[in-house]
Image (cartoon, helix red, strand yellow):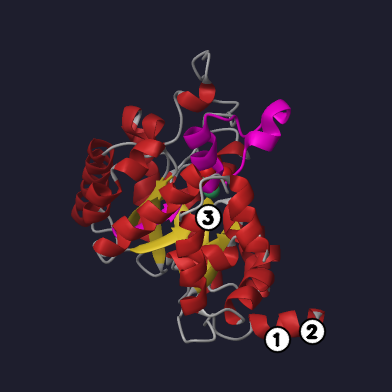
Amino acid sequence: FEKELEESSALPTVTKDGRKLEVCGNVGSLEDVKRAVQFQIDGIGLFRSEFLYMESDHFPTEEEQFEVYSQAAELLGDKELTIRTLDIGGDKGLDYFEFPKEENPFLGYRAIRIGLDQTSILKTQLRALLRAGASGHIRIMFPMIISVEEVLKALQILEESREELAKEGVPYGADLEVGVMIETPAAVMMAEELAERVDFFSIGTNDLTQYFLAVDRGNQKIAAMYNSYHPAVLRAIYQTIRAGHKFGKKVGMCGEFASDPKAVKLLLGMGLDEFSVSPGEAANVKYQIRNASADEAERLAKEVMKQPAVEDIMRLLEE
Ligand code: PEP
Ligand code: MG
């Protein structure tokens, strides 16, 4: 079976009835990118740029970031490299940046909220990304979005960064795709309006599940309640995919749910375009997709979406 898996990894990600998908990798460093390439991923669906910041003793300079992003892009050749802007706060801190004392850090000063508050941090990163995008196939992704206003502000800072680089005569990628993570209930409810304004979505089920169910993703006491098969979470995922497709935008998923063995066929049936998973899981996911029929998966998804409880959903998925 190991051999079969490996052989399937080298082949295109296509279902038995011919639907083309992508199985990408989630990474946090250049080392991870190298590993992901060895695992024959179709691209990188999530580069968690915060690790770059966490491993440094200062905010990484534009030049330092440019180096890392360029090298990552080079390792990937013409494959897509989706880099998420700094997603810090929540449970992730920085030694050199003072966070406010917060009662609820996961509902607090984190991710894009910091970038839009301290715009020079975001701009430094966007300039580095744009520059690396001059030669590499880079996509920019904003985390923890809750509103159209946030997207417009982030796009405005991106535009300013482009203008600065142009004025300075520094080469940059003019047509980088820009997307958002869908990982808050607000983003799901606003998915159509967001889809009109960005190039792609990536569903972050780790946070989405936590925020939809009001269940802390790290609290062991209620770990059993943290369940992405909850029909409310599945409906959120389905609604997001349909909203993206209504505006012709690709929808991926970079949360852990994308590699859950029982979820792959269901997500395929819901119309997900891209699965981004830890590189070690990529072969399994690809194998499942290559052995599934998209038509059949769609029928399964329709049935699952009618079920009122996790128990009923699991029964259908296990059949
Ligand atoms: C997510 O929330 O699903 C996600 C992919 O982001 P992170 O796990 O880094 O919060
Ligand atoms: Mg997240």
82 versus 90 height, above or below: below
- Assign a secondary structure to mark 2: helix
Instruction: Give 169 or 42, whichever is nearer the viewer.
Output: 42
Q: Amino acid at mark 2?
A: Lys
Q: Is residue 129 magenta?
A: no
The reply to whether discs 3 and 1 touch (Cβ–Cβ < 8 Å) is no
Q: CA distance from mark 2 to mark 1?
A: 6 Å
The reply to whether discs 2 and 1 touch (Cβ–Cβ < 8 Å) is yes
| Disc 1 within 8 angstroms of ligand 1 (CB) | no
Examine the image and state in which quarter residue 140 appears: bottom left
Magenta stretch bounds? 199-228
Q: CA distance from mark 3 to mark 2?
A: 26 Å
186 versus 131 height, above or below: above
N-terminal of the pair, mark 3 or mark 1, is 1
Q: Is residue 206 magenta?
A: yes
188 versus 32 height, above or below: above
Q: Which residue is mark 3?
A: 254
Q: Quadrant of the N terminus?
A: bottom right
N-terminal of the pair, mark 3 or mark 2, is 2
Q: Amino acid at mark 1?
A: Glu
- Assign a secondary structure to mark 3: loop
Q: Quadrant of the C terminus?
A: bottom right
Q: Which residue is mark 2?
A: 3
Q: Which residue is mark 1?
A: 7
Q: Amino acid at mark 3?
A: Cys
| Disc 3 within 8 angstroms of ligand 1 (CB) | yes
Determine the residue positioned at 49% across, 86% down: 17
Judge the density around disc 3: few (<14), some (14-19), many (≥20) Cα neighbours within 10 Å. Answer: many
Q: CA distance from mark 3 to mark 1?
A: 24 Å
Q: Position of residue 235 (x, y in %)?
A: 43, 49
